[in-house]
Image (spheres, rainbow, N blue to C red):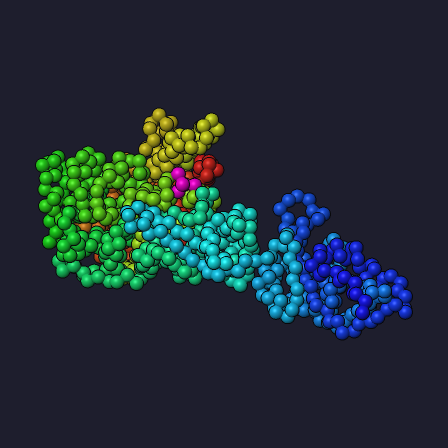
Amino acid sequence: MAARAPLLPVDLAPLLVRELLSPALNGLLPLPEQATTRRTGVRPKPLLTLGSVPRSGLRGGGQEPVDYAMLDFDYDGLRLSTTAKGELARPAGTGIEIIERHHEDEKAALSALHAAGFRAADPDGQHDRLHLPSQHDWLLFAGEGLAGLRAQGWHIELTPEYRFDLAAIDDWYAQVAQDHAETGSPWLELELGIVVQGASVPLLPVLLQLIREAPRDFERGALELRRDDELLLASLPDGRRTALPWGRIKPILRTLGELYFSDHVGDTLMLPALDAARLAELEASAQLRWMGGEQLLALGRELNAFERIQPVAPPVGLQASLRPYQAEGVAWMQFLREYGLAGILADDMGLGKTIQTLSHILLEKEAGRLGEPALVVAPTSLMSNWQEEAARFAPGLRVLVLTGNDRLQRFDQIGEADLVLTSYALLPRDEEALLRHSFHLLILDESQYIKNHRAKAAQTASLLRARHRLCLTGTPMQNHLGELWSQFHFLMPGLLGDEKAFNANFRKPIEKQGDGERNAFLIRRIKPFLLRRTKDSVAKELPPKTEMVRLVDLAGAQRDLYETVRLAMDRKVREEIALKGVARSQIVILDALLKLRQVCCDPRLLKASETRKGGAPSAKLEALLELMEELLAEGRKVLVFSQFTSMLALIEAELQARAVPYALLTGDTKDRASVVNAFQQGAAPVFLISLKAGGVGLNLTAADTVIHYDPWWNPAAENQATDRAWRIGQDKPVFVYRLIARGTLEEKIQELQRTKADLADAVLAGGETQGLQITAEDLLGILGPG
């Protein structure tokens, strides 16, 4: 038998074989009839070539390659393309061998690819190239379709450029380096990774590269549109590729957030140990195999589930019954103490933060843990309040008050006390003496007093030695997010980063850009350490509160004066801003706003040289007196608040002229207690109070009406004032009036109040963050015509 002509090797480059040999071997040359032999039993074996080529005809970079499949058939060593016509022929000895094609087998193979989604659509004109609709389809085919074809005997060839030669993922893991947390360092080290062919591959650099290449694909809105079963093509550091299921990636991205994926990310993340809650979130959602960090995971689970914090029995020595939400607050403080954490009790005014804190201190004493005293720092006006409530509710506590000039003789008694009281004003003066002691608890009441961390009182508070720290405030944030940062910087330095990083990562995106994703990230980070309850949510027994705005029309000389001052101030402010910019024009801006506010209240508040028009009446004062006459005739008891003590003096003179009994409280009042008692016991139906002096530390439940004579930028300050009357113990409906001069900056201040309230709501209650920044245009708009 004559030797057979050598067969063409199947593994030669398919395009080269097709170009050079197919004309002669695929029946395209004339063959002598007498020299041919015919074979009919050769069945074709499918050969599938998979590759990727650069996209042609497109300008610019960054375009994804074109991925393709090419189907050929192996007939006993001869390679045939799907587009070839005619019969197969090759030399055989002195003659020609013709191999009969099995078109039904070829059609069946092509149909199998069509069933997998392949279609012929090639812009390069190679009609035998097949394509899939999307990268997701290619990833699915690489993971599932290829295995099925191989099982059916298909031969698969992959070009070096083929993008979907995927390495299988054997496992997903998370590893926590515990030595950082256990040695007292405030940081922990977290590595997230996958196991590929037995080797661990850190996942964070892989994700970082994907985020850099297509940041919009990883925004929260885009993530939510991804199905869990969709796949993400990822390149590994060694050049291999793999498919990451979005269902595994999304929980990681949601939990950690983009802030963790900075340019400094290596194989691991450095996290504050206080961020253990993030570990628990990952454990619950990302289906990872955990190695190490058991204690931190346990802590994180607790932090993520405050509602499951175990209740605690009230202290035996407490001379009061705690409301359910107050008992929860005490359990929360005990939980923080147990795990060595700190936090802010941010309940609304009037919900009993003081009694919750006293209960916490009592529990520590009764458990034998109060080996060193608890130090409470509060505004001077609250010193008597703390003394009185401690004596009333916790008479078993030994209380030492460090106020007055004779306090210097009492410093040596600190070690013998259970509860030490001092004020923010005295803190810097007594720093040296206080630093000689250490405390079991350090509690800042009305902690918004340290909203400027550069203030001396804030710096001294941070230096004091204490095992546990707490902040108490009904208004953890009044004007901007920096105030919140300052309090957490005192409580747990590092939780929110340093001030510069916090401003860049949170303040600017949230306040200026209304970034809801960044706001949600901030909320998740502080949530375990900030407990906030509102009156509406927990004090159902409180009577209703009705708020009303009374618009007052300025007329005649007062309106003329307002317009004269407005025009002058508008011109002056615009010139200053043009010269120095908004940031360096604050003094001039505030002076302009002050003068306009004074005109609205009463022209007499301006200096005589500025009025130029003496004797302009005050429409607002007249409106107040008319309203007061109505209210007093109905037997109401009224609180009147103003920013200006000079305005209170003018109101006082009018009440004296009408023989209306009143009480007065300003920063100059020496004996606050007697003034408060006079009103509470009914000696005076009207209580004139400066907003600064009366915003905290007063329980004025005898009042049923509150009048805000002039608005202020900060709604929290007004709400604090209102809460002097609308608080636990109030059994009458409370009516709140705001007097606003129509068509003036006071109406515009009302709108800015809403903006600031929205900012606080966005951070503390997860509200919207759009349009929260006060801009130069806003300020100039305030000075514009009504």
Q: Which residues are magenta?
A: 500-504
Question: Hey, which residue is sitting farthest top in the picture?
Answer: 609
On screen, residue 78 versus residue 760, left or right, reads: right
On screen, residue 337 versus residue 419, left or right, reads: right
Q: Position of residue 36 (x, y in %)?
A: 86, 69
Q: Position of residue 270 (x, y in %)?
A: 38, 47
Q: Position of residue 409 (x, y in %)?
A: 9, 36
Q: Position of residue 10 (x, y in %)?
A: 71, 61
Question: Where is 750 relative to 614, above or below?
Answer: below
Question: Where is 401 relative to 289, above or below?
Answer: above
- In the image, 441 versus 453, the foreground residue is 441
Q: Residue at x 53, y 46 (%)?
A: 212
The answer to whether any part of residue 675 appears in the image is no
Magenta highlight: main SS:
helix
The quarter of the picture where the N terminus appears is bottom right
Question: Hey, which residue is sitting farthest bottom in the picture?
Answer: 41
Question: Hey, which residue is sitting farthest front in the picture?
Answer: 1
- In the image, 782 versus 206, the foreground residue is 206
The answer to whether any part of residue 453 appears in the image is yes
Q: Residue at x 68, y 50 (%)?
A: 55
- In the image, 405 versus 723, the foreground residue is 405
Question: Where is 502 relative to 282, above or below?
Answer: above
Q: Residue at x 65, y 69 (%)?
A: 153
Q: Residue at x 34, y 47 (%)?
A: 187
